[in-house]
């Protein structure tokens, strides 16, 4: 799954650690998400969407989209 | 941008620290096993004393198992949880064919060393560590 996390994080000037703290996950999780190695659970996807004030579909997209 | 408090959670323990705690408790149980054997051979401790020592040495492992389960079920970061679960699954899946292979080769008279209970206790811990390491690599 593709995602816009690196761009959104950069827009806010946050490090991966900053984002991890805000989401209540480990930095390893944020790193794996950004690299497309790990797809988040639905609750985490909602937390990410709320944090950035965007819909889930604008942040995450299937590879074929 | 300020973050709502509802989005913040405490720092999560790492899988490594959790596994280290479990290994320390396992080491205590193995040490107790050694002491019981030595005391039995030397005749220094009565049977009831050895039983008490056996229970006391295994107690930390029960406590660690409970803590491990609580962290795994409730508190772990979701990726760490997944890594630990994959490590446990790897250990379970791999231990069965390895055990079957060992038993068959022993039955066939191949000169394999005899495994004592402490060896059998360590095998799953080593396989879980290997499984966690493999899962960690996949998500890096």
Image: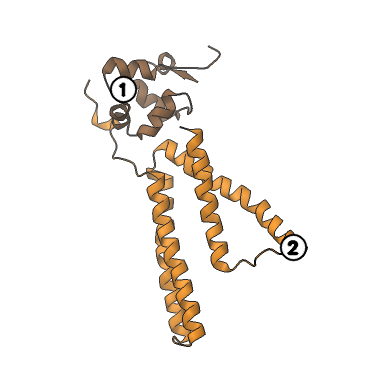
Chain colours: A brown, B orange
CA distance for labels 2 and 1: 61 Å
User: Furthest residue to the front?
Assistant: B111
Tell which residue pokes out farthest to the left in this image: B2
Q: Chain of mark 1?
A: A
**Which dot marks residue B50?**
none
Q: Is residue B95 left or right of residue A62?
A: right
Q: Which residue is mark 1?
A: A51
Q: Is residue B102 left or right of residue B41?
A: right
Which image quadrant for residue A47? top left
Residue that badge 2 annotates: B110
| x, y percent for residue A31 | 40, 28
In the image, what residue occupies the spot 50% across and 83% down? B40
Q: Relative to residue B29, is residue A52 drawn left or right?
A: left
Q: Taking the image as drawn, is residue B67 in sight?
A: no
- Can I make out residue A2 in this image? yes
Q: Residue furthest top?
A: A65
* Chain ID of residue with mark 2: B
Residue A20 location (% of width, % of height): 32, 30
Task: Give the residue at the far right of this rendering.
Answer: B108
Mark 1 crowd level (few <14, some 14–19, many ≥20, 10 Å Cα): some
Q: How many marks?
A: 2
For mark 1, give the secondary structure: helix
B56 over B7 or under it: above or below: below
Q: What is the x, y in percent for residue B25? A: 41, 61
């Amino acid at each position: 799954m593709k995602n816009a996390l690196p761009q959104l994080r950069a827009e806010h000037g946050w490090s991966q650690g900053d984002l991890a703290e805000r989401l209540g996950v480990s930095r390893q999780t944020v790193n794996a998400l950004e690299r497309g190695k790990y797809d988040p659970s639905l609750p985490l996807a909602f937390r990410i969407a709320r944090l950035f004030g965007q819909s889930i579909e604008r942040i995450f997209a299937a590879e074929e989209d | 941008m300020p973050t709502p408090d509802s989005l913040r959670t405490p720092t999560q323990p790492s899988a490594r620290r959790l596994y280290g705690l479990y290994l320390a408790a396992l080491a205590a149980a193995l040490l107790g096993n050694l002491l019981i054997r030595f005391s039995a051979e030397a005749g220094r401790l009565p049977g009831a004393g050895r039983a008490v020592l056996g229970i006391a040495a295994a107690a930390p492992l029960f406590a660690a198992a409970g803590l491990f389960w609580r962290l795994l079920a409730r508190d772990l970061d979701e990726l760490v949880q997944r890594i630990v679960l994959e490590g446990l699954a790897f250990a379970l899946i791999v231990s069965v064919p390895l055990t079957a292979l060992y038993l068959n080769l022993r039955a066939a008279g191949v000169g394999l060393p005899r495994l004592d209970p402490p060896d059998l206790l360590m095998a799953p811990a080593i396989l879980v560590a290997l499984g966690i390491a493999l899962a960690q690599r996949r998500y890096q």
